[in-house]
Image (cartoon, rainbow, N blue to C red):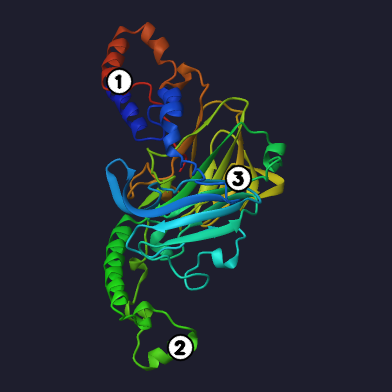
Amino acid sequence: MHRRQFLATGAAASIGGVLPNFNFIEERSTKDNARHFSPILEPIDASSGFKEFHLFVDLVQHEIVPGVSIHTLAFNGTIPGPEIRVNEGDRVRVHFENRTGLNHTIHWHGLHVPWRMDGVPYMTQLPVMPDQTFVYEFDARPYGTHIYHCHWGTMLHMQAGMYGAIIVDPAEGQTDPIQNVFPYEREYTLVYSSHDTNFIRNELNIMLERMKERRFLMQNGRFEKERFGLFADIDDLKSAMAKGYHPPYTTRRRTSADLPDPNFFTINGKSYPETPRLMIREGENIRVRLINAGASAHSLHLHGTDFWVVADDGYPLPNPRRMNTILLAPGKTHDIIIPGDNPGIWAFHDHDTRRATNNGVYPGGTLTALVYEDLPYMDRMAMPGMAEMQEHDPAAQMENASMEMDGLTHLPFISLDQ
């Protein structure tokens, strides 16, 4: 292979690899990386004795990765929804407004709320119908990293974007138990999910049309429990079946092919190369809150160092464990502390590389990286030593100048173990 062809191939491979454009570490950390994390939801009122928040859901168009946009259900216009931060013991009031043509609820996953506030339709509350608002009230407990998500049509609504993080910090005046053991300077929240874009598109269209029909029937006094699949108990269901009612599971004849088969895997709503980075400096600790709001398990592996697992489902571990790979199952949260003890640009990825693809093409999905902001400039180059080589090689200088015009230089080439 000709030398210029090799250099161009290496640079192009890095574009399709893990970390494009990381010669601009400072620019990414200060101007761009912050937008890859959910905004903090500000309380709308505190004078009532509650911390009050306004959450709404709407149908929006969301770009998963450049060139791929889908219609999704989003809390306050973002995927994930905004991060809610409260202190343990706070009285919380959430005004939930439904701006879509579908039914919804909010389940406070991992929080110990009154049972009427748990968000399970027809078990703890009626669904929040289109154009309705429901008020959730609860005391914030227990401490830790938790999730909120829709509990209606969960198979569709969660992968379509209706999820977010709710963080319960220590009570006012109390110190953080994690901070006490592992002093950290900053923290990041990573919410993982998986999406079948074809399933989302088809099911959203079907459900929106079905809801139009149901709303028309309700408005005209033609509500039928069979049409809505609502029965008082098992005997009520059997009675309806004896009269000719056919439950949908007997007529649809679903097969595995009809169920979601994810083709995009995201962190904070984005697939690589749009995933958020974990920025760190040598000598500091960072806290990373890992949340799985999807239906796929992720085996998350960090290169370059081992992290401490310090909390499981929000609860601080009495004996933190040192690991480099952790299984993040659906519905789970883990908190980890990453020490800044090995400067570099380190891959942090799903070791099940099916989750590291975009529509079946590698690289993609949940690829991201731990990036040292204070890494020396020359260490960020795609091929260390290139500058020294250029000093004595006029041909290399000319080739590099041409590549600079093409935007191909200073792109780190990092391979993932597969």
**Marked residue nearer the N-terminal end (2 or 3):** 2
> How many C-alpha atoms fall within 10 Å of the one at disc 2: few (<14), some, or many (≥20)?
few
What type is the residue that disc 2 sits on?
Asp
Residue 147 horizontal side relative to residue 198, left or right? right
Label 2, on which residue?
A: 236
The numbered disc on residue 3 is 1
Q: Eyeballing the image, is 8 above or below 142?
A: above
Q: Eyeballing the image, is 333 above or below 247?
A: above
Residue 245 horizontal side relative to residue 46, left or right? left
The residue nearer to you, when weighing 109 against 155, is 109
Question: Within the image, what quadrant is residue 236 found in?
Answer: bottom left
Label 3, on which residue?
A: 335
Q: Which residue is drawn at 30% across and 20% down?
A: 3
Secondary-structure class at tag 3: strand
The numbered disc on residue 40 is none
The residue nearer to you, when weighing 221 against 61, is 221
Q: Where is residue 320 in the image (x, y as percent from the top left)?
A: 69, 44
Mark 3 or 1, closer to the camera: 3
**Marked residue nearer the N-terminal end (3 or 1):** 1
Residue 1 horizontal side relative to residue 364, left or right? left
Q: Name the outermost residue toward the front.
A: 47
Question: Within the image, what quadrant is residue 273 found in?
Answer: top left
| Number of dots carrying numbers | 3
Q: Which residue is drawn at 42% across and 39% down?
A: 275
> How many C-alpha atoms fall within 10 Å of the one at disc 1: few (<14), some, or many (≥20)?
few
Q: Position of residue 291 (x, y in %)?
A: 52, 49
- In three-dimensional space, the C-alpha distance between marks 1 and 2, rounded to whole angstroms, equals 77 Å
What type is the residue that disc 1 sits on?
Arg
